[in-house]
Amino acid sequence: MNREPTRPPDRVGAVIAAPEMPEIMPEFSPRAGVIGFLRRNPKIAVGGTILLLLLFCAVFAGFLGTVDPGAIAPSRRARPPSPEHWFGTDMIGRDLYSRVVYGTRVSLFVGFSVALVASFTGLAIGLVAGFLKWVDGPVMRVMDGLMSIPPILLAVALMALTRGSVGNVVIAIAIADVPRVCRLVRSSVLSLRELPFIEGAVTAGSSTPRIILRHVLPNALAPLTVQATYICASAMITEAILSFIGAGSPPDIPSWGNIMAEGRVLWQVKPFIIAFPAVSLSITVLAVNLLGDGLRDLLDPRSATKA
């Protein structure tokens, strides 16, 4: 005999659970996201902030400079810092503050231009040399030959063959940095070339340019981005060295190297002539290196400091 299942008796005063309410997602705030990112990456925050201030000085140098940086006043030569001339004057009476501010343009332009030219040229050569075995040997022997020459000597030799100009300085320094970028990209491509997804693309019949641009290039950009920041900092120092020895920017263009070169005669009695451009160059290089270190920690998955 089948019996219907008995229903348990209702309990008096039983508490009925309220239906669960869906969780409300917090509203995303771009400002909070940016602030959180900068807090997790203090090197990027500090380096980026300093670079933004320097870019502001370079762009608005005409408004920030107190006088014409090329204005000569022999009666006011080699004067110490004062309310009239914040950084003092050089050996022929030119205002050092205005020259240092205008010199920011040259250093940032050379640094960023060299980083872009060397990165794009080295990227193209490294991609082709790393993916095509028959090109690898001849190209890398040329790169090894260029790397055997110290960058400063190579830049000086190239500048000796041309006339002094900011554009020629960029080309001379970039040529010395291309082999290092090429070797970095080539090493990344060699490690990527044997991975299954590359072999699958080859098996599927994808053309070589398509494989390089779609599969290899995106995976090689992370180390190249970090390397570009170090190239930028190195290029600023190299430009200052070339200008200091008279093989860089023309004397009529204010740059930190030129200012230090002109003040080296009086550096023992008038150290401020060299001190202000030297400190400006040091701060700029430090900011670029901090940015590069922060990007390295951010893009490297093995980094312990990655958020």
Image: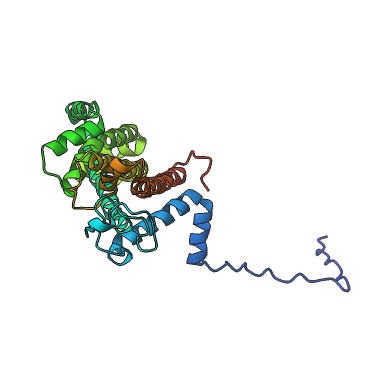
The answer to which of 299 and 45 lies nearer the viewer is 45
Residue located at (15% from left, 45% from top): 164
Q: Is residue 205 visible?
A: no
**Image position of 275 with respect to 21: above or below:** above
Q: Is 37 left, or right, of 179 in this rendering? A: right
Looking at this rendering, what residue extends furthest in the front direction? 75
Specify how the rendered protein is coloured: rainbow
The answer to which of 203 and 174 lies nearer the viewer is 174
Residue located at (27% from left, 39% from top): 241
Quadrant position of residue 257: top left
Looking at this rendering, what residue extends furthest in the right direction? 12
Q: How many marks?
A: 0
**Image position of 34 with respect to 174: above or below:** below
Could you tell me residue 303's position as x and y percent? 49, 40
**Image position of 202 with respect to 3: above or below:** above
Quadrant position of residue 200: top left
| Quarter that holds the N terminus | bottom right
Could you tell me residue 286's position as x and y percent? 41, 45
Could you tell me residue 67's position as x and y percent? 27, 64
The answer to which of 28 and 224 lies nearer the viewer is 224
Residue located at (31% from left, 51% from top): 78
Residue located at (83% from left, 65% from top): 6
Looking at this rendering, what residue extends furthest in the bottom direction? 13
